[in-house]
Image (cartoon, rainbow, N blue to C red):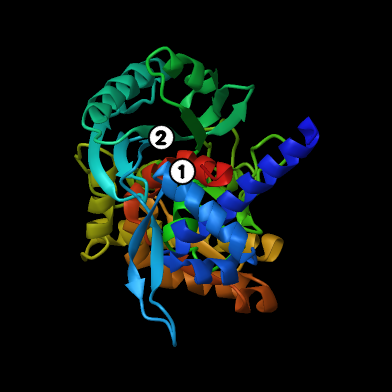
Amino acid sequence: MTDEGRRNVRDLRRANRARLLRQLYFHGPLSRQDLIQATGLSSASVSNVVADLLDAGLVVEAGAVESEGGRPRILLRVDTSCFEVIGIDVGETRIRLERFDLGLGELAALDLPVLDGTLDPEAVVPAIAAGLAELSAGATAPLLGVGIGVPGIVQHQPYAVIHGQTVGWDAFPLEERLRAHTRLPLFIDNGATTMAQAEMWFGAGRDVDSAVFLLLGSGAGASVIADGAPFRGSTTSAGEWGHLNVQYQGRRCRCGARGCLEAYVGAEAIIARYAEAEGSAKIVAADEEETLRQILALAEESGPAGDAARDVLDETAVRVGVGIANVVNFLNPQRVIIGGWAGLALAPSLLPRIREVVRDHALRLPYSLTSVDLGALGADAVARGAATLPVARLLEAGA
């Protein structure tokens, strides 16, 4: 056989392994007969690939089920204990590191504060390195890799360079800096994109292939999923929902422009707008999360401070709702999903108003085919999504 022929056979076998491994990862346990039906592969191909995966230790037997008129069928599943992965959420209020098994079950977690409320990239690198060393020391299986979700645009040149205009990261070579501290494989992407992948795999997006995920934290971002994969645009910056201009010569945004949506709906902007409102109460809090919770609590009270809080929150709901209506009209997604720590904090009180505004501002047909929902994975979705990045590479390779 020629070298080209051997490559073709090897590539075909790798593709078959990847197809079966994905089926077992997302839908297992399954029998060999289930795999034949799900993948369309022949019985011989399934048997050969399963034998490969069993030999590699990626797949194990998981009991048996009765079959009609024959021997019990052996079930197979991915051995989630054979590898571990680390996911990191580089947020503006904290850096969250989590270690997971291969099935993304959490094993350990570590929160690192963001000093002085500023995400200094020169301080982030040693903080991540120290956190990685601590989490890695507790691993009981080989570490497959480290995924990192960051604020800003990520370009691979070939190492990941971060353009975080709102946090002062100007083409920061994060991956290159981190490689000086660890030999683990590194996978870096935008935080909204990692959140979206976690929700697509395990949460609110599992049953759709067209969705927009909105991340509301200190600022506002989004990830657009089309045909089951992130839409990145020509330079990976697609999804900057927070920097849609919604008010000509409006409030100054952290990016330097005026009138961005983020200047109205990000937690930092909500807090600033409340402080400027007539009748507002002075709030003393340790961080943005506590401050936002206090504003939400004030909105339940009577008096000038409560009135100011309700006005600010209602404007926030209107701005978010109009922003989602624009997304519905422009992108026609099956679902719009709100996540991020601020989004999840605001949603219990604001979601009905947000949906009402979306209904009033979106075209009737696309609106009727879209739902506006909350993320299902909580505030840790970015870190969990980051951990999916090395797992996705394993599934794509089939080994």
Which numbered dot is residue 337? Answer: none
Of label 1 and label 2, which has the lower sequence position? 2
Point 29% across, 36% down: residue:
141
The picture places residue 140, in percent across and down from the top left corner, at 24, 35
Identity, as a three-letter code, of the amino acid under mark 2? Leu
Within 10 angstroms of label 2, few (less than 14), some, or many (20 or more) residues?
many
Q: Is residue 338 above or below residue 358?
A: above
**Label 1 to label 2, Cα distance in Å?**
8 Å
Residue 348 vs residue 48, the one in the foreground: 48
Point 45% across, 68% down: residue:
31
In the picture, measured across the screen, residue 42 lies left or right of residue 127, that is right
Q: Secondary structure at mark 2?
A: strand
Point 23% across, 45% down: residue:
290
In the picture, measured across the screen, residue 4 lies left or right of residue 299, that is right
Quadrant assignment for the N terminus: top right
Residue 220 vs residue 247, the one in the foreground: 220
Q: Secondary structure at mark 1?
A: helix
Q: Say which residue label 2 marks.
A: 144
Q: Are marks 1 and 2 in contact (CB under 8 Å)?
A: yes
Identity, as a three-letter code, of the amino acid under mark 1? Val
In the picture, measured across the screen, residue 210 lies left or right of residue 265, that is right
Q: Is residue 140 above or below residue 198?
A: above
Q: Is residue 176 above or below residue 150?
A: above
The picture places residue 204, in percent across and down from the top left corner, at 45, 64
Point 50% across, 55% down: residue:
50
Q: Say which residue label 1 marks.
A: 391
- Dividing the picture into quadrants, the one containing residue 286 is top left
